[in-house]
Image (spheres, rainbow, N blue to C red):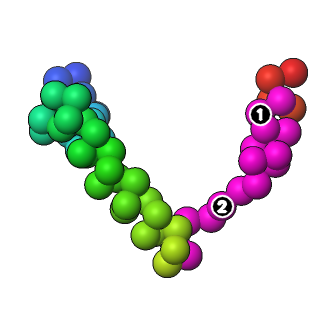
Amino acid sequence: MTTTELAQPAALARHEVREPLRPHDPSPAGIAAAWAVEIRRRVAAFERGNVKAYAAEDVFAEAHRLAR
């Protein structure tokens, strides 16, 4: 197997991760609309119980601990 063949799965994985993040309409209005859709998706996932929530003070305490 060549190095090019070995790199193909990684390149495909990078594309699969980045493509959904790429805005289809790069204008400010298009970006705002994409974020509105994403916010609705995240809120719905939270309301269904699919996402675990953490208290802000716990998040900041852990960030502070890791920064030491």
Residue assigned mark 1: 63
- Residue pictured at 85% horizontal, 39% vertical: 61
Q: Nearer the viewer, residue 32 or 41?
A: 32
Gap between marks 1 and 2, in whole Å?
A: 16 Å
The amino acid on which the numbered mark 2 sits, given as a three-letter code, is: Ala
Q: Name the residue under label 2.
A: 53
- Image location of residue 67, percent across then percent down: 80, 23
Residue drawn where x is 83% and y is 30% of the image:
64
Farthest residue, direction front: 29
Tell me the SS state at disc 1.
helix
Q: Looking at the image, which is closer to me, 51 or 57?
A: 57
Q: What stretch is highlighted in magenta?
A: 49-64
Q: In the rendering, at what x and y percent does residue 24 appear?
A: 13, 38
Left or right of 21: which side holds 2? left
Look at the image and tell me in which quarter the N terminus lies.
top left
- The residue lying at 78 percent from left, 38 percent from top is 60
